[in-house]
Amino acid sequence: SSIKTIGYEAFVCCAALEEIDIPDSVTTIGPFAFAYCPEMKRATIGNNVTAIGEGAFEECRSLETVSLPESVKTIGDRAFKSCDIKYFVIPKNVQALGKNVFEGCASLVECFFDGSEAQWLKIDKGPYWYDSKTCEGYYTQGHLLWHDSVIVLLHAEYSWSLSEDQTAYIM
């Protein structure tokens, strides 16, 4: 396949679309490419995708499973807003995370970052992303866990506290 980009709103509002397998030839998923596909349950992203655009899967309310390859470097604003994702892995090569990536994902239990604390701290993150160095106040529906179990909280509705041994308590 020679398709390199899935363009702006390419499959927006495709009511019958239930799953997608994006081929390895694709490098960019454009803004709102699959937004408002109410029956989409699964998205497998090809191994050469580097950018997931703003709102790419926004309001795909049945979307439970998303597999991102290590090649992904950018995840745009609201990329997975109001999806039914329960577990999510952010690849270690991500360099930029937009704002409100998981806004309205009420089912999100855990979100794992597949890299080190040093890698996490280097990511250009939009507003509402917090880490153990900057966290105060009210946060998450879930949390980010590095492989060494350092916790990074996402923004949201629950208050939390960090103990001296770096254990997070969600209240």
Image (spheres, rainbow, N blue to C red):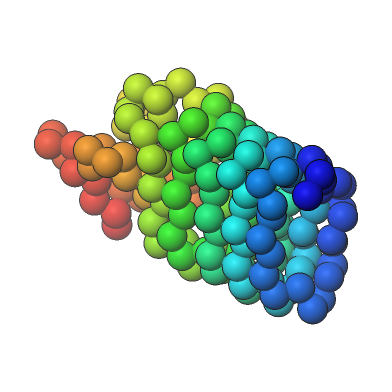
Seen from this angle, which residue lies furthest front?
A: 1
Residue sitting at the far left = 165
Where is residue 22? Give x, y as percent: 69, 55
Which residue is nearer to you in this view: 118 or 4? 4
Instruction: Say if 48 sits above or below 159 in the image.
Output: above
Q: What x and y, as percent, mark residue 75?
A: 62, 39
Q: Is residue 60 above or below residue 16?
A: above
Left-right relation of 12 to 41:
right
Q: Is residue 156 above or below residue 51?
A: below
Residue 75 can be seen in this image: no
Q: Please tell me which residue is depicted at 62% across the width and 72% down the height of the picture.
A: 41
Of 21 and 169, the residue lying toward us: 21
Q: Nearer the viewer, residue 59 or 147?
A: 147
Q: Residue at x 87, y 55 (%)?
A: 10
Q: Is residue 27 left or right of residue 159?
A: right
- Quadrant where the image shows the C terminus: bottom left
Which quadrant of the structure image shows residue 126? Answer: top right
Using residue 144 as the reference point, say whether residue 97 is left or right of it: right
Q: Residue 121: image x %, image y %?
A: 41, 24
Q: Position of residue 144 (x, y in %)?
A: 37, 45
**Left or right of residue 121, residue 105 in this image:** right
Query: Toward the viewer: 146 or 142?
Result: 146
Q: Name which quarter of the figure residue 109 lies in.
A: bottom left
Any part of residue 71 in sight: yes
Residue occupying image coordinates x 76% and y 69%: 37
